[in-house]
Amino acid sequence: MGTLWYGGNIYTLQQENDRVEAIFTRGDTIIALGKEKELRERYDNELDSVVDLQGSTLLPGFVDSHMHLIGHGEKLIRLDLSMYHSKSSALSALKEYAQGFSPGEWIIGEGWNDNLWDEPMPILAHEIDEVVPDHPVILKRICRHAIAANTQALELAAIDRQTICPPGGVIEKDEKGNPNGLLKDQAQEILLNVVPAVSSAYMEKAMRAAIADAHKLGLTGGHTEDLNYYGGFDQTYQAFQNVVEKEGYKFRAHLLVHHEVVEDMIHSNNHYLSGGNWIEFGAMKLFADGALGGRTALLSHTYADDPSVSGVAIFTQEQLDELILKARKYHMPVAIHVIGDLAFEMALHAIEKHPLTDIGRDRLIHAQILRKELIERAKRLPLILDIQPRFVASDFPWVIDRIGEERMNYCYAWKTLLDEGIPCAGGSDAPIEPLNPLLGIHAAVTRTNINDSDKTIYYKSQSLSVYEAVSLFTKGSAFAACHEHDRGMIQEGFAVDFTILKEDIFMMAHDHIPLISVDKTVIGGEVVFG
């Protein structure tokens, strides 16, 4: 038996402006497209339900190509500092939050962002001590490449002036040479290793919250990287199976596999693209550098606003080459976090040295700071760039001062990448940025921040059309996960994953895009929201 969908604006995305009047679906598969009357007549004997869109706009399901599902859920259930516009207000919120905990319990907060503050200075240990004296505290910066910890947490981790910083990390110190509470990139692991392990119940609670939020935002799936942070591969994978498969929280979860748990995946009798309709395994994930906020993104030059640093390489070139070889040993593509141009260059070198010969395609994640010659090299490789358009809204204008105006021609250059023929997918990097895909689409199209009353446009020539921006979160995400033949478009044989919006995103003023309401979210033929 089947369902007829009609009565609205149905965009197939097979081509720009391609529309159909109606869709007939059977179960979780699109069977036919065409005129409403013709489909009613052709499938009269098996038509058991109809959905009148009542003027709404139906699109292929939005899929976030780069997120952290459990991390987003944690942001929903933990202290969220991402919207505070001063250090003092963030610390006040921490003090109030801590009152609900027993003395000695660990307190973890998410998302402080010193770039929003009048004085962009990070939170330090002595400042946390003043408001929360009787708990170990860690506060994760918005980028998750830096942690602010208080004295009690540092002591529990045995971090002092004698502590040797691991390669690829930074332990910041005060003028006396003592740790000041700020740990960056790999140095965070020293502290995170002493935080009590989370329970399966906690993970599952965060996952339920994240998926429910994703449904409200019109997301039908996400490419998520969680498997190395919550008690190990087995416990985290089991949490996905419990919530998504057993409890039926429908969500197309494409799991990137951190290089430290690839062997665990293999031992579980899985491999690249193994799994089912709801959970499948993706590329091997690794980090080549840090983030711009903490000046740990690896640049080929020093930072314009701090000539003493040029970023942090998580691995040497030789180590990076070996990790790519490890992925090839397991017949896997790689997904590499690269923000700075030197990190991007190192990743290209490793991929060129050990090219992918199996199915799939490599992906380079973020790709914010580039040079023309790097784009030319990337064009020659079977890879996709996994970009986060919302970064335009959150990183400008401060990133110009950080990189230098003279070096910005190929930075955040989404239009150039598409025009050069490099496939791109669209994600949010939630919880670093808001999960809402409409915010990402808005930023890609307008090159503005919705909260900027002046509506300053940053590099207008890099603006995408609405069709290009929507395609990032539909066709682009499908291509990144090797699902271009069954997801990402409205087409016969494709999945019944729909994002249905109250208004026509292609026909409205661009400033209004983030304000569109999600009417329904449909996954596998089931309405999960609306």
Image (tube, grey):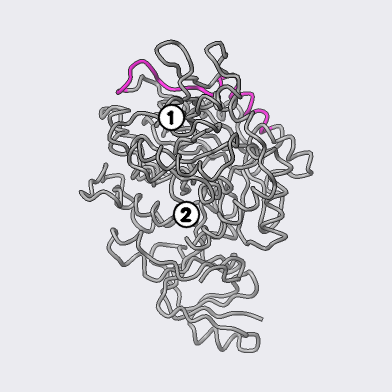
Question: Mark 1 is on which residue type?
Answer: Glu
User: Where residue 281 sits in the image (x, y, percent)?
Assistant: 67, 46
- First of labels 2, 1 by sequence position: 1
Residue at 33%, 20% (x, y): give it: 306
**Tag 1 residue:** 130
Between 83 and 152, the one nearer to me in the picture: 152
Relative to 287, is 80 on the left or the right? left
Q: In the structure shown, which secondary structural element does the residue marked by tag 2 occupy?
A: helix
* Residue 317 percent location from the top left of the image: 55, 20
Residue 345 makes an appearance in the image = yes
Note whether 319 is above or below 214 in the view shown. above
Q: Residue at x 42, y 71 (%)?
A: 57
Residue segment shown in magenta: 304-328
Q: Is residue 460 left or right of residue 483?
A: left
Residue 451, position as x, y percentages in the image: 29, 50
Mark 2 or 1: the one toward you: 1
Whether residue 67 is visible here, answered yes or no, is no
Instruction: Name the quadrant containing residue 369.
Output: top left
What amino acid does circle 2 point to?
Phe
What whole-number distance in Å separates the C-alpha atoms at marks 2 and 1? 44 Å
Residue wearing tag 2: 473
Give the answer, above or below, for where 40 lies relative to 91: below
Q: Nearer the viewer, residue 25 or 235?
A: 235
Is residue 323 found inside the magenta-colored segment of the image? yes
